[in-house]
Amino acid sequence: MANIKILDTGYLSADRTGTPLAVTLRAGYDGSGTVSPFTLKVESLNKEGNSLIDNSPIPNSGDQTKTIFIGFENNGYALNCIVSKDQSNTGYQYDYLYQLSKLEKTSGMKLLYVDSTTDGTKTIVERFGNKNVSGVFQGSGKELSASTPYLIGRVKKVRIGDDAKGDKYRISINFEETI
């Protein structure tokens, strides 16, 4: 099991250009000028690839649907996590779950990276993530160290539900990679 972190960067593009959004407009805002990454205990992390095939019909054309090799979806990742119901709200304005649910609503790019693994094996993020590729989010004064593999994208959906025992929340996050 790995601990995955998700950070709302506030940048509107994957190349980290422009001015980031104000911290109050990002998920993970702590109420005092800082945005904290979310550390999630991941039970499963699945890569959902895309073969870049499109078979969407053209409306009002009367033509049969043809399969073409152009796709409109980026690779996605499905994270299934658990959070204890006694999770501390320290470091988050209002509530941890409230801030977590904002991940799908805020416009800034999100970084998904590995905090630690308990068994020493590499995660999907470490195998498929960007590492020392462009340094856009890595290095001195930036979000991550130069050796941290990461995925950059947007959170498409956050689902939060109760665990059967009632002592944990089950959280599912759909993350879409942008580059």
Image (cartoon, rainbow, N blue to C red):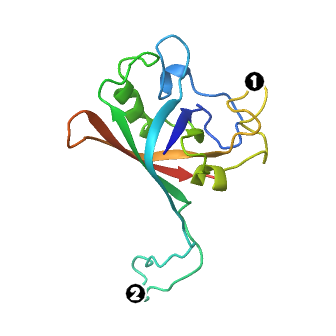
Q: To which quarter of the image does residue 141 belong?
A: top right
Position of 174 compared to 136: left or right? left
Q: Amino acid at mark 2?
A: Gly
Name the outermost residue toward the front: 119
Per the image, the residue denoted by label 2 is 62
Decide which of 62, 107 is in the foreground and name it: 107
Name the outermost residue toward the top: 32
Q: Give the residue displayed 51% in from the left and 75% down from the top.
A: 54
Q: Please state the total of marks drawn on the protein image.
A: 2
Q: To which quarter of the image does residue 86 belong?
A: top left
- Picture coordinates of residue 115, whole percent (x, y): 58, 36
Q: Give the residue displayed 35% in from the left and 29% down from the top.
A: 97
Mark pair 2, 1: CA separation: 56 Å
Q: Is residue 8 above or below residue 1?
A: above
Decide which of 119, 62 is in the foreground and name it: 119
Decide which of 55, 74 is in the foreground and name it: 74
Q: Give the residue displayed 28% in from the left and 35% down from the top.
A: 168
**SS class of the residue under badge 1?**
loop
- Picture coordinates of residue 130, whole percent (x, y): 70, 49
Name the outermost residue toward the left: 165
Q: Is residue 104 above or below residue 175?
A: above
Position of 157 compared to 124: left or right? left
Per the image, the residue denoted by label 1 is 141
- Picture coordinates of residue 167, whole percent (x, y): 24, 33
Crowd tier of the residue under label 2, counting other residues whose Cα lies within 10 Å: few below 14, some 14–19, many 20 or above:
few
Crowd tier of the residue under label 1, counting other residues whose Cα lies within 10 Å: few below 14, some 14–19, many 20 or above:
few
Q: Earlier in the sequence, mark 2 or mark 1?
A: 2
Q: Is residue 134 above or below residue 55?
A: above
Q: Give the residue displayed 50% in from the left and 27% down from the top.
A: 26
Which is in the foreground here, disc 2 or disc 1? Answer: 1
